Image: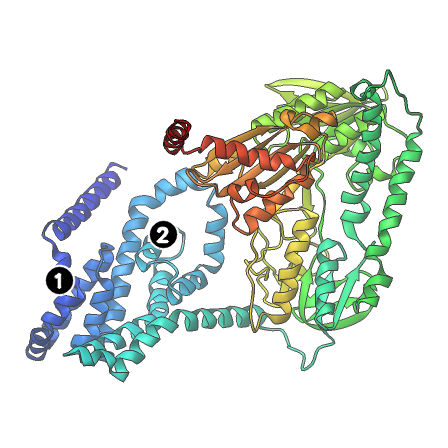
């Protein structure tokens, strides 16, 4: 152990000494284009007289420069072409650069790999697994398309489990094409004796190669990757469809609609109900139930509106029937009849992807150019011992209730848990909400979560944060959840339990596993920025891909998945999430777009905070909804919006103005100068912008203006 430690220290000292010598004696001056040109004739003469020695010295210097990651490798490569010509220069540079890169790789591994594994091993587990599986291809891609400087690649790969021999061989092959381009440019630079030489066809061609090589290499890598993924599958001579879409939720519906709109032949396969979770078990029924419960909250707040008292007579079963009626009213928007009228072939059945080009359904085999997986997600049910002893509820089956639970336990403090905890409490259930983290609504700032928790508690919800569910047991006909809270067991009796701890992507059971399609560590479909999966004929959209599991995010992704699948051979479009909003429909609502304070601090992003309290807004006061606030994060000393959080009535509606502003690069000054109808909740946006403007008032200029006005008064 001590020997290894001292070896590392000695190597570090040696490297430091060499770097100090390099910069201290300004050795970099000998690795410049000007020096190369000034010594061109002498170098050529020296090579002619002492060929083996010159080549040996050149390679030694190149290896040292590369191994120490010193600046000058590019000039050395050009010099190789200028001094030795193309073929000999290519041979020398190829071996010298690879040997130097491998030395840098080995030094990084020896000095840092144990520390990195010890400190960050758990976080890098997925990276290590990927390198072990496809490390050679990743390295080849980086070498062929130099997105990062080669010295960075050398050092970073040294911290991975890739074999040294693999690193050397792949580096030599991967860098060969780029090396050839630079060496060829060097042979042309050697011909320049005057300004007119700059316009020589050979030099122009060499620099053209330098410019277009990354694009050619990128296309080559994409082609190699595509062929590798599709190897072993017979490509049909013709196809039944341009696109087959699996799943008729928000992502699948929009994808197929766009495909049909551009006259592609598209099939949409759904095994259950058109409309997916949003229509049948998610957004639509939850918002309908939230609305009914809100009417009861208004009755309980009768005095806020000038009434002595108010009461509402209702039957829970009738409320749930209203939810079903709302779904039925919206169903035609997502129906088979509507989508067939739009040109989409709708197929009811279980799809199975059998190859990159074929999908089986109802005994038929559909051949297709591309496939879009839009299979959505389902409620995640944690493996809590004893949970299977009781009939638990999720966001899928809670809508089947026709009898109100007397004691409802909501497991989870996220958006769904908070919305339904408040709703069932308003409908008359005694609700206990259990969250294992220190706060509910973990993605929001602490002050936002605190306000919502206070509101829930004021309405009667018992909110237990920092409680981790351990087990469910049944004793004396009573259902009990056992939680751990600071090392002590807490028992909670319930009549019904609603599990709302998140959602899991639907990625199994329809052929992805058999094809070897890659998944993320979160068990979602692995898709690149163009929503293409590891098999290039398969795309993904919606909850199955993530990272945002919202209906509007699924619709947003659907455009990119559809267009890229149909026209990607001509032009592909990379998806952008920079101004994607979301809303939690508690009362008050919480709406977000961009960064909040928690995000900014985690990412070390500087920001200025502007806060406007909605209790100052005329319309909010008139509606007796004068609670909540707007928080705007801006880039310091500018009005550029980094993110907005709104807590208040109709927050999900009024945030749209900020979404538009962020999407199109408009600042708070533009919002301040926009006329807003009075009195509206949306005026809060203008007042928030005004609060920012007041904080950035030009005090020095205002003092001069004050003096001007005093002078004008005489």
Give the labeled residue for mark 2. Answer: 156
Q: Is residue 140 left or right of residue 186?
A: right
Q: Quadrant of the C terminus?
A: top left
SS class, disc 2: helix
Q: Nearer the viewer, mark 1 or mark 2?
A: 1
- Looking at the image, is 646 positioned above or below residue 217? above
Q: Looking at this rendering, what residue extends furthest in the front direction?
A: 714
Q: Residue at x 77, y 23 (%)?
A: 431
**Residue 474 location (% of width, % of height):** 80, 24
Q: Which mark is residue 697?
A: none
Is residue 638 shown left or right of residue 370? left
Residue at 11% x, 49% y: name it.
24
Report the Cα–Cα distance between label 1 and label 2: 28 Å
Q: Is residue 562 visible?
A: yes
Q: Secondary structure at mark 1?
A: helix
> So how many labels did they put on this image?
2
Q: Are dots 1 and 2 in contact, CB under 8 Å?
A: no
Q: Is residue 531 above or below residue 213?
A: above
Work out whether 296 lies above or below 539.
above
Q: Is residue 490 left or right of residue 138?
A: right
Q: Residue at label 1?
A: 30
Q: Which residue is pictured at 18% across the width and 46% down the height?
A: 16
Q: Tell me residue 459's x, y (percent).
A: 76, 21
Please tell me which of labels 1 and 2 falls first in the chain.
Answer: 1
- Residue 639, x across and y down, in percent: 48, 41
Query: Could you say which quadrant of the image residue 70 lies in?
Result: bottom left
Location of residue 501 in the rendering, given as x and y in whole percent from the top left corner: 68, 36
Answer with the quarter of the image where residue 574 lies: bottom right
Report the front residue among 438 and 586.
586
Q: Quadrant of the N terminus?
A: top left
Circle 2 packing at 10 Å, graded few (<14), some (14-19), many (20+), is: some
The residue at 54%/58% (across/down) is 529
């Amino acid at each position: 152990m001590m020997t290894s430690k001292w070896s590392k220290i000695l190597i570090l000292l040696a490297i430091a000494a060499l770097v100090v010598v390099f910069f201290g004696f300004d050795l970099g001056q000998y690795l410049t284009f000007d020096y190369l040109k000034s010594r061109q004739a002498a170098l050529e003469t020296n090579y002619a007289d002492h060929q083996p020695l010159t080549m040996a010295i050149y390679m030694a210097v190149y290896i040292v420069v590369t191994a120490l990651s010193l600046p000058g490798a590019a000039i050395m490569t050009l010099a190789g072409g200028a001094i030795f010509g193309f073929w000999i220069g290519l041979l020398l540079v190829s071996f010298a650069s690879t040997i130097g890169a491998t030395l840098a790789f080995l030094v990084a591994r020896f000095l840092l790999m144990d520390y990195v594994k010890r400190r960050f091993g758990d976080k890098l587990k997925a990276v290590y697994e990927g390198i072990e599986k496809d490390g050679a291809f990743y390295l080849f891609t980086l070498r062929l398309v130099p997105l990062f400087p080669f010295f960075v690649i050398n050092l970073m790969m040294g911290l991975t489990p890739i074999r040294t021999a693999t690193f050397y061989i792949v580096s030599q092959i991967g860098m060969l094409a780029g090396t050839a381009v630079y060496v060829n440019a060097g042979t042309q630079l050697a011909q320049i004796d005057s300004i007119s030489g700059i316009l020589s066809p050979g030099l122009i061609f060499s620099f053209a190669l330098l410019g277009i090589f990354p694009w050619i290499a990128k296309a080559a890598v994409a082609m190699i990757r595509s062929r590798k993924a599709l190897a072993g599958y017979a490509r049909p001579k013709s196809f039944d469809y341009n696109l087959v879409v699996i799943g008729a939720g928000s992502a699948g519906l929009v994808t197929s609609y766009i495909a049909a709109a551009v006259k592609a032949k598209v099939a949409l396969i759904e095994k259950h109900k058109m409309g997916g979770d949003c229509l049948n078990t998610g957004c639509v029924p939850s918002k309908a139930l939230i609305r009914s419960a809100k009417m009861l909250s208004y009755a309980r707040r009768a005095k806020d509106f000038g009434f002595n008292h108010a009461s509402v007579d209702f039957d829970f079963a009738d409320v749930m029937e209203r939810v079903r009626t709302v779904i039925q009213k919206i169903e035609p928007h997502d129906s088979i009849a509507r989508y067939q009228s739009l040109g989409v072939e709708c197929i009811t059945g279980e799809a199975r992807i059998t190859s990159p080009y074929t999908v089986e359904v109802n005994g038929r085999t559909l051949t297709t150019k591309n496939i879009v997986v839009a299979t959505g997600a389902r409620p995640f049910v944690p493996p809590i011992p004893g949970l299977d002893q009781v009939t638990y509820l999720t966001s899928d089956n809670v809508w089947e209730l026709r009898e109100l639970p007397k004691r409802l336990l909501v497991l989870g403090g996220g958006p769904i848990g908070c919305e339904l905890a408040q709703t069932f409490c308003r409908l008359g259930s005694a609700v206990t909400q259990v969250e294992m983290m220190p706060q509910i609504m973990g993605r929001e700032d602490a002050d936002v979560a605190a306000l919502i928790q206070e509101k829930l508690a004021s309405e009667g919800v018992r909110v237990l944060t920092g409680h981790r569910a351990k087990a469910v047991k049944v004793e004396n006909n009573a259902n009990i959840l056992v939680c751990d809270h600071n090392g002590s067991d807490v028992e909670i009796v319930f009549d019904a339990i609603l599990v709302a701890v998140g959602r899991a992507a639907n990625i199994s059971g329809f052929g992805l596993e058999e094809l070897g399609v890659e998944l993320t560590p979160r068990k979602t479909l692995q898709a690149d920025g163009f929503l293409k999966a590891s098999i290039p004929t398969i795309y993904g959209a919606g909850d199955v891909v993530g990272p945002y599991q919202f209906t509007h995010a699924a619709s947003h992704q659907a455009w990119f998945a559809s267009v890229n699948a149909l026209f990607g051979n001509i032009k592909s479009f990379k998806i952008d999430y920079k101004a994607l909003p979301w809303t939690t429909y508690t009362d008050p609502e919480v709406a977000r777009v961009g960064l909040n304070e928690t995000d900014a601090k985690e990412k070390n992003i500087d920001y200025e905070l502007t806060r406007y309290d909605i209790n100052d807004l005329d319309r909010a006061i008139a509606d007796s909804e004068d609670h909540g606030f707007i928080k705007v994060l801006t880039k310091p000393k500018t009005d550029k919006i980094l993110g907005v959080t709104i807590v208040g009535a109709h927050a999900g509606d009024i945030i749209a103005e900020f979404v538009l502003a962020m999407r199109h690069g408009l600042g708070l000054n533009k919002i301040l100068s926009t006329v807003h109808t009075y009195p509206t909740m949306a005026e809060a946006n203008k007042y928030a912008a005004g609060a920012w403007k007041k904080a950035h008032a030009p005090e020095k200029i205002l003092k001069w203006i004050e003096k001007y006005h005093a002078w004008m008064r005489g």
